Image (cartoon, helix red, strand yellow):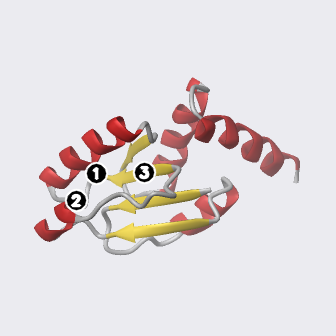
Amino acid sequence: MNALLIGADRLGNIPDLLENRGIEEFTHWDGRKKGMRKLKIPHDTDVVIIFTDFIEHRLTEKIKSETKALNIPCIFSRRAVSDLSKQMDKCQQCGLCDFSRQQLIHKDNYRKS
């Protein structure tokens, strides 16, 4: 699974959480420069995670509308492992997209080990 992370200058322990949740690869945009509004979501993106406490507001609006148009799940979280984990759990509960179904599988496997 591939994720696009937007916002936050540093990711800290977030890559460890993503790996535990089955996200093998991710691209990180810091989201602070207005030139980032010109970037396109990579075609192989399975989920977009936006860190709301460190992002340019108009970029958030642009990404939100793009993810809706492309039917890609978009998770909004603060830049904290605990909050991201909570938001990913909420996303998993809907079960409507491949990402949420995949999260359920990885979370169950993680608990067993």
Q: Position of residue 36 (x, y in %)?
A: 20, 67
Q: Is residue 54 left or right of residue 103?
A: left
Q: State the residue in front, 5 or 77.
A: 5
Residue at horizontal 11 percent and vertical 66 percent from the top? 34
Q: Is residue 22 left or right of residue 81?
A: right
Residue at horizontal 57 percent and vertical 26 percent from the top? 96
Q: Position of residue 20 (x, y in %)?
A: 69, 58
Whole-angstrom CA distance, mark 3 to mark 2, is 14 Å
**Residue 52's disc number:** 1
Q: State the residue in front, 95 or 78.
A: 95
Instruction: Say what secondary structure mark 3 lies in.
Output: strand
Residue that carries the numbered disc 2 in the rendered image? 55
Disc 3 residue type (three-letter): Val
Q: How many marks?
A: 3
Q: Are marks 2 and 1 in contact (CB under 8 Å)?
A: yes
Label 3 Cα crowd, 10 Å radius (few <14 / some 14-19 / many 20+): many
Q: Nearer the viewer, mark 1 or mark 3?
A: 3
Q: Position of residue 63 (x, y in %)?
A: 27, 49
**Residue 48's disc number:** 3
Whole-angstrom CA distance, mark 2 to mark 1, is 6 Å
Disc 1 residue type (three-letter): Thr
